[in-house]
Image (cartoon, rainbow, N blue to C red):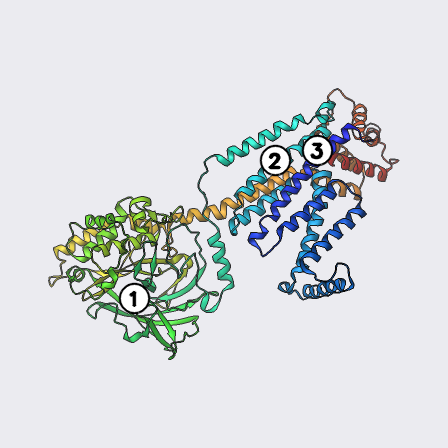
């Protein structure tokens, strides 16, 4: 007959095992959402069946037959047509398994059939029923499986479509109930508590359950902080894409330069992977394309691409603009390349001219195509000839605002809030010419509380305008926010403007034969503004906080060699306009993704590359501390096994006393070693401690160790250590 204490022990261990099974189910629930696994309920039912047999401790050979039979029944119902256990049934099963074994040896994993994959999955459930029984019931060491479950759920919640919020909440409740029961039972055994009512009465478990449920409900219902770290997914995804991409499709996605600008906003994680190196005389923008249609959420093209020979495209600026003939060489690094040419302002031709340059008349993106307009292979290295312009500020001020040929660059969505246009009027109220109006808007952001940041940048709600949100609510963002807002503000004033994107000049890393060598990374991806001036052309402007305009400007000088009053005033004004930008430019690299740069990037890098390793080190130290007696025991076992001498015997015996004290069985001050040994032997139902103590006293007081049975003592010590750690 089973006594009351045994029944209570089975009751508590059954609760532990059921908790283990509930945690295991959390591994199965997401499979239907993140994989092509069907009939997930069948696998759950098979898991219930296997865990039930292990729970009731059915004899192993009976359990083996029942679990195996259930596995064959499931496979038969899902995949096999012949009569169950008929010769044809076995033949079909054998052929399928033979085929899959060959696929395994050939490492063609995608050739594995659904039947074989299901068999492997059912076998895994079968084995887990044994493993969790050992962890939860025999050893009562469940923390590792709990941690693995939390890690599994959080990874799925972060990187897949699975929403693991409620699953983590369930896991928290089940895990802490199981941990509470396991540790309480271990303490009872360790302390040898004589109060039998504690083991017989289940009342003690109620406070544990109530405490866990109360804390869970409070944690679930309490307000939560927003995420404090930037989302790592874009960075990881981008890195994976860049590592595996090549050829025409190796554009930087999400982090760095990207094609899709239809929905702007949101934070990003910076990527400093080098993209190309440029050998040039001076630092300047590397322009790729422009976009003309603002939707209220981002930028799109007004129509399909229309490619024409590059020579037929009207120049960006008039012949009256001073320019300098320059040459630059671009060399892509790693697997990076673009199907659109990187072009400095004033692009003329490739040298040598190995292919025809065609340009999209709408976006001004330049590509290499053959006579049939088919895209040519990208070049890893090419040299560009260009006439780099220098814009005269006086001429820009005097440019007439009439007869603009680019009315299409005045487009604005009907949904644009009126207060955006009212703000543009307010900013430029005292300005009379197009240049001063553009400069006033460009400098508005630096003196009205706008901040450059890459984290916690909001995405507009469904009925919210991207520019309106930035101008009147967040006032925080990166280049896309600043440049788009300036374009929209200019268009409300009937000034043609467009959104340009590409790369900033990069970091100077060397000087070669009078030229500078610049390295450009994903983080240098950038967007800026181009404004049209009649009889001059398209002129770049830089509204982003912390960035300076890379285009060249000059002030004309009269015949006496003196600047005009207007020019002196403009020069003085410009000195006052950009002190903050120049100061930030000294401290910060000129980098950013289709928005990216400044101190927020450094903060992000510090959190990612310093804080996370520190956390990992702390976790490793904590695990090492919690398991110190296990690895110390392992090390000492090897030591005494190889050399059981008097000194090592004393070390082993003192370690035994230390381990007993750690487990709550320390020696009292008024106890003799023999009294203490008898107490320990009663607890662990053995006589090993007395034998070890006797020989220790012989060694300590009589220095008699030669006749000691060394192998026997070593084995006694190991046996007792094993009992203590069990």
Density class for disc 1 (Cα within 10 Å; few <14, some 14-19, many ≥20) is some
Which quarter of the picture shows residue 703? Answer: top right
Density class for disc 2 (Cα within 10 Å; few <14, some 14-19, many ≥20) is some
Distance between mark 1 and mark 3 Cα atoms: 77 Å
Comparing 163 with 522, the one in front is 163
Residue matched to label 1: 345
The label number, if any, that marks residue 12 in the structure image = 3
Comparing 210 with 497, the one in front is 210
Residue 351 visible, this angle = no
First-in-chain label (2 vs 3): 3
Q: Position of residue 109 (x, y in %)?
A: 64, 63
Q: Position of residue 269 (x, y in %)?
A: 44, 51
- Contact check, label 1 and label 3, Cβ < 8 Å: no
- Which of the image's four quarters has the C terminus? top right
First-in-chain label (1 vs 2): 2
Residue furthest out toward the top: 670
Q: Position of residue 1 (x, y in %)?
A: 83, 31
- Contact check, label 2 and label 3, Cβ < 8 Å: no
First-in-chain label (1 vs 3): 3
Residue furthest out toward the front: 83
Q: Position of residue 561 (x, y in %)?
A: 13, 61
Q: Secondary structure at mark 1?
A: loop
Residue 19 visible, this angle = yes
Q: Secondary structure at mark 2?
A: helix
Q: Secondary structure at mark 3?
A: helix
Residue furthest out toward the bottom: 371
Query: In percent of the image, x 58 and y 38: which residue is there?
Result: 172
Q: Mark 1 against mark 3, which lies toward the viewer?
A: 3
The label number, if any, that marks residue 176 in the structure image = 2
The label number, if any, that marks residue 62 in the structure image = none
319 left or right of 128 in image: left
């Amino acid at each position: 007959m089973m006594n009351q204490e045994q029944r209570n022990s089975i009751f508590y261990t059954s609760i532990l095992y059921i908790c283990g099974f509930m945690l295991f189910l959390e591994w199965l629930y997401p499979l239907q959402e993140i994989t092509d696994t069907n009939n997930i309920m069948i696998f759950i039912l098979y898991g219930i069946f296997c865990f039930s047999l292990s729970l009731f401790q059915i004899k192993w050979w009976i359990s083996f037959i029942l679990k195996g039979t259930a596995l064959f029944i499931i496979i038969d119902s899902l995949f096999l047509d012949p009569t169950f256990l008929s010769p044809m049934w076995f033949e079909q099963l054998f052929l399928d398994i033979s085929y899959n074994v060959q696929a395994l040896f050939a490492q063609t994993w995608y050739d594995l059939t659904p039947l074989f994959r299901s068999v492997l999955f059912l076998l895994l459930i079968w084995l887990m029923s044994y493993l969790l029984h050992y962890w939860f019931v025999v050893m009562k060491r469940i923390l590792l499986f709990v941690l693995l479950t939390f890690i599994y759920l959080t990874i799925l919640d972060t990187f897949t479509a699975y929403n693991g919020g409620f699953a983590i909440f369930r896991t928290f409740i089940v895990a802490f109930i199981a941990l509470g029961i396991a540790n309480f039972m271990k303490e009872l055994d360790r302390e040898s508590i004589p109060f039998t009512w504690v083991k017989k009465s289940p009342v003690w478990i109620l406070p544990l359950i109530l405490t866990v449920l109360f804390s869970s409900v409070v944690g679930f219902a309490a307000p939560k902080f927003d995420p404090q770290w930037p989302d790592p997914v874009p960075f990881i995804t981008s890195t994976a894409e860049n590592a595996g991409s090549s050829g025409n499709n190796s554009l930087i996605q999400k982090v760095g330069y990207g094609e899709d600008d239809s929905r702007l906003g949101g934070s990003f994680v910076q990527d400093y992977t080098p993209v190309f190196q440029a050998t040039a005389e001076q630092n300047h923008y590397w322009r790729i394309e422009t976009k003309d249609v603002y939707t209220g959420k981002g930028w799109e093209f007004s129509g399909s691409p229309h490619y024409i020979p590059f020579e037929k495209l009207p120049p960006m600026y008039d012949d009256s603009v001073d320019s300098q003939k320059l040459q630059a060489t671009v060399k892509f690094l790693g697997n990076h390349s673009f199907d659109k040419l990187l072009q400095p302002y004033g692009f003329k031709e490739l040298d040598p001219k190995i292919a025809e340059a065609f340009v999209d008349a709408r976006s001004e993106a330049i590509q290499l195509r053959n006579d049939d307009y088919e895209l040519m292979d990208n070049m890893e290295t090419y040299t560009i000839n260009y006439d780099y312009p220098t814009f005269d500020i006086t001429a820009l001020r005097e440019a007439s605002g009439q007869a603009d040929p680019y009315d299409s660059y005045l487009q604005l969505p009907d949904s644009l809030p009126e207060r955006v246009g009212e703000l543009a009027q307010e900013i430029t109220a005292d300005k009379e010419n197009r240049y001063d109006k553009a400069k006033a808007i460009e400098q508005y952001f630096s003196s009205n509380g706008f901040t450059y940041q890459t984290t916690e940048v909001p995405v507009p709600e469904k009925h919210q305008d991207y520019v309106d949100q930035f101008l009147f609510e967040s006032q925080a963002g990166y280049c896309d926010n600043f440049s788009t807002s300036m374009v929209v503000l200019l268009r409300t004033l009937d000034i043609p403007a467009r959104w340009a994107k590409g790369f900033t000049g990069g970091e100077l890393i060397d000087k070669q034969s009078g030229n500078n060598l610049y390295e450009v990374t994903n983080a240098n991806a950038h967007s800026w503004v181009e404004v049209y001036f009649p009889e001059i052309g398209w002129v770049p402007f830089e509204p982003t906080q912390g960035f300076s305009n890379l285009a060249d400007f000059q002030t004309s000088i009269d015949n006496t060699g003196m600047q005009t009053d207007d020019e002196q005033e403009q020069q003085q004004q410009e000195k006052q306009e950009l002190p903050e930008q120049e100061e930030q430019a000294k401290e910060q690299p000129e980098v950013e993704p289709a928005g990216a740069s400044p101190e927020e990037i450094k903060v992000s890098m510090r959190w990612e590359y310093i804080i996370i390793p520190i956390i990992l080190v702390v976790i490793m130290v904590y695990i090492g501390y919690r398991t110190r007696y296990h690895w110390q025991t392992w090390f000492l076992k090897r030591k005494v096994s190889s050399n059981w001498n008097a000194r090592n015997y004393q070390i082993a015996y003192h370690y035994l006393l230390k381990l007993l004290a750690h487990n709550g069985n320390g020696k009292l001050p008024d106890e003799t070693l023999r009294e203490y040994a008898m107490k320990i032997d009663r607890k662990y139902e053995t006589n090993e401690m007395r034998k070890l103590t006797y020989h220790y006293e012989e060694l300590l007081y009589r220095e008699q160790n030669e006749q000691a049975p060394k192998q026997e003592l070593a084995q006694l010590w190991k046996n007792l250590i094993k009992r203590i750690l069990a």
